[in-house]
Amino acid sequence: MSSAQVEELERRATAAELAIEELKKSMHAQPLGNGDNNAGLESRLRELLKLMEEDRLECEVIRAKRDELKEENERLRSQVLKHEYRIKHLLRTINDIETGKQHNERS
């Protein structure tokens, strides 16, 4: 996943945390006689906590995969540079050999 997707997951987690805080505040502000309403709020809080935890876990997996891919990308770039260097010198050697053959054929 891209960094934009990771950022979106982080925004969702932050929004869920804010919603939880707001629900907690509203629960504490309401009188204790509202048992049904408090049960609904508590249920909603639990849902939000579950969603937030799922998003966090998904985000951690994405970050780990991204870090792994970055390392692989660096290794591959290094290999490409080594191969380009070798190719450059092989082409130079081939060119020198062909140039030497041309001089030998003319002599």
Image (cartoon, rainbow, N blue to C red):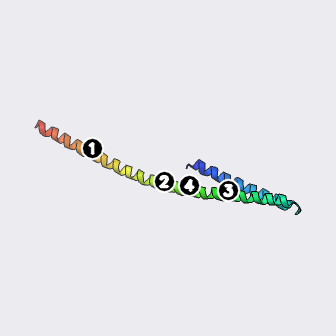
Earlier sequence position, callout 4 versus callout 2: 4
Q: Nearer the viewer, mark 1 or mark 2?
A: 2
Earlier sequence position, callout 4 versus callout 3: 3
Secondary structure of the residue carrying numbered label 1: helix
Q: Looking at the image, which residue sits at the far bottom?
A: 32
- Assign the C terminus to one quadrant of the image: top left
Q: Amino acid at mark 2?
A: Leu
Instruction: In this rendered view, identify the residue nearer to me: 70 or 20.
Output: 20
In the drawing, what numbered circle is on residue 62?
A: 4
When the figure is inspected, residue 93 is found, relative to residue 18, above or below; the finding is: above
Residue with the mark numbered 3 = 51
The quarter of the displayed image where residue 96 is located: top left
Q: Amino acid at mark 1?
A: Leu
- Give the spatial CA distance, label 4 vs label 3: 16 Å
Q: Nearer the viewer, mark 4 or mark 3?
A: 3
Q: Give percent across and percent down for residue 89.
A: 28, 47
Residue with the mark numbered 2 = 69
When the figure is inspected, residue 6 is found, relative to residue 46, above or below; the finding is: above
Residue with the mark numbered 1 = 91
